[in-house]
Image (tube, rainbow, N blue to C red):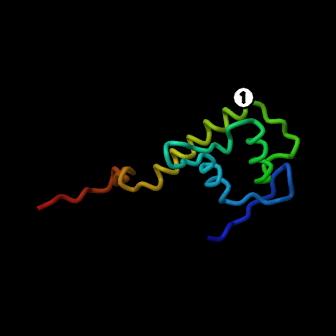
Amino acid sequence: MTEKPTAPTANTSKPVTTVVGLDFANTAIALPGGQYVDLLGSPASVNEWLTGHGLAPDNADVQEMCATQLRALREHVRSLLAARSSPAKTPRPSPPANQPRATAT
């Protein structure tokens, strides 16, 4: 898979790639036996993840409120990705109102 670089972030000269969204969604990892690892489980780990992806400086001093908001955002991103990857759940678009519909004979 090739990564498509975009514009550099405000905090660093490293470009952000389109893979960051998927990496962000996958920061909660399910393990066997009902266990899981949350890479955004604490403010320090959030800061480490953001820094590692070039999205924040090393000294961002992420607070618990911000970490909680990022975890909530992650769940919304995961829901959006799940909806887009499941064509059976995606409703088919309706034809335009001025276009006649085909009828079965």
In which quadrant will I find the C terminus? bottom left
**Quarter holding residue 28:** top right
Q: Looking at this rendering, what residue extends furthest in the bottom direction?
A: 2
Label 1: which secondary element: helix
Give the camera-side residue of 12 and 61.
61
Is residue 3 shown above or below 101? below
Q: Residue at x 79, y 35 (%)?
A: 62
Report x, y in % for residue 48: 78, 46
Q: Residue at x 25, y 56 (%)?
A: 101
Q: Looking at this rendering, what residue extends furthest in the front direction?
A: 33
Report x, y in % for residue 40: 68, 41
Give the camera-side residue of 78 and 105.
78
Would residue 35 be found to the left or right of residue 39 on screen? left
Q: Residue at x 46, y 49 (%)?
A: 83
In which quadrant will I find the N terminus? bottom right
Query: The residue under label 1 is which amino acid type?
Result: Met
Q: Residues within 10 Å of mark 1 (few under 14, many from 20)?
A: few
